[in-house]
Amino acid sequence: MNPLNYRHLHYFWVVAKEGGFARAAERLDMAVQTVSAQVKALELSLGHQLIKSSGRSLVLTEAGQAALARAEEIFRLGQTLHDDVRQAASGPAVRLAVGLSDGISKLAAHALLAPLLDTPSLRLVCHEGEVEQLLAELAMHQLDLVLAGQAAPHNPNLRLSSDRLLSAPVDWYGPAALVRKSAVDRFPDCLADLPVLLPTGHSALRLAIDRWFDQHGLRPRVAGEFEDSALMAVFAARGLGVFPVSRLGAEDLALMRGLRHLGECPDVREDIHAIRSRRGLHHPLVQRLMAGALA
């Protein structure tokens, strides 16, 4: 198999993006015949026709579509090379890859990670997804840490450890138009009369809140459900409804103008667990996070 000529691939990529040899030649500042010859050389190298005529236009064959998809990936990666080299030349970056499970408050997660944000040359990577998916990435060392609403399941093959970082009481907030003194004085009964925003059903916090509603005989009108607590706060600030948030996450609500405190339900708590692999146990930023949160 002949080694791939990336110059030939680039010419083919430009032809496909521009929709023809003439426009590609103009963009490359080359003769049409030269561009055509380079693409033909790529087709000979790969052993398949990539472009064919269709009336007065050119279309990609199935092989050409596959080649274009791979070329898009290659040149997208190539565009990041300058940034990567510049960052490496300016000093080693401290990379921290964190998985955030769908069910946890992103406001609380931000508050937990905030003490690390002043780390020089920090490169913070946050992935969001289902717990099972994130734990698989953690086991394959694609993540250094997972923040989730529950402890790591017992699985001797994964060799994961977890600690509860946070167990914070939950407060309710809402826009000034809804959080009036009469509502505050009647909390939590007022929730039966106000539009309510809640975490989605797979969240551990949602389950605790639903039980709390049952205990108080409340049947609120749910105006919205959100996986992301920060997005929920934005919609609340726009007047959509009142919403619950852990007290730690509420520290970030100062960024949301117009939100007011409605009431407390201290018997409802949000738990966040830090799950690590053996490799993550030795990451300096993970150690710093754990030391600060468990102090």
Image (cartoon, rainbow, N blue to C red):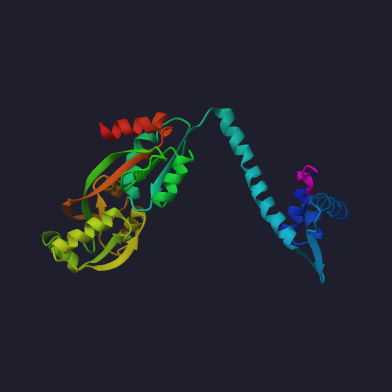
Q: Position of residue 61 (x, y in %)?
A: 75, 63
**How far across and down, in percent of the image, does residue 258 sit?**
27, 56
Q: Residue at x 33, y 50 (%)?
A: 104
| Nearer to me, 147 or 85 | 147
User: Measured from the top left, where is residue 210 in percent x and y?
Assistant: 22, 61
Name the image quarter holding the C terminus.
Answer: top left
Is residue 250 magenta-colored? no
* Residue 109 in which image quadrant: top left
The residue that appears at 35% across and 60% down in the rendered structure is 226
**In this rendering, would 115 be left or right of 213?**
right
Tell me, yes or no, if residue 80 can be seen here.
Answer: yes
| 62 to the left or right of 281 | right
Whole-percent x, y for residue 50 in the image: 78, 58
In magenta stretch: residue 3: yes
Q: In this view, does 173 lie to the left or right of 279?
A: left
Q: What stretch is highlighted in magenta?
A: 2-8
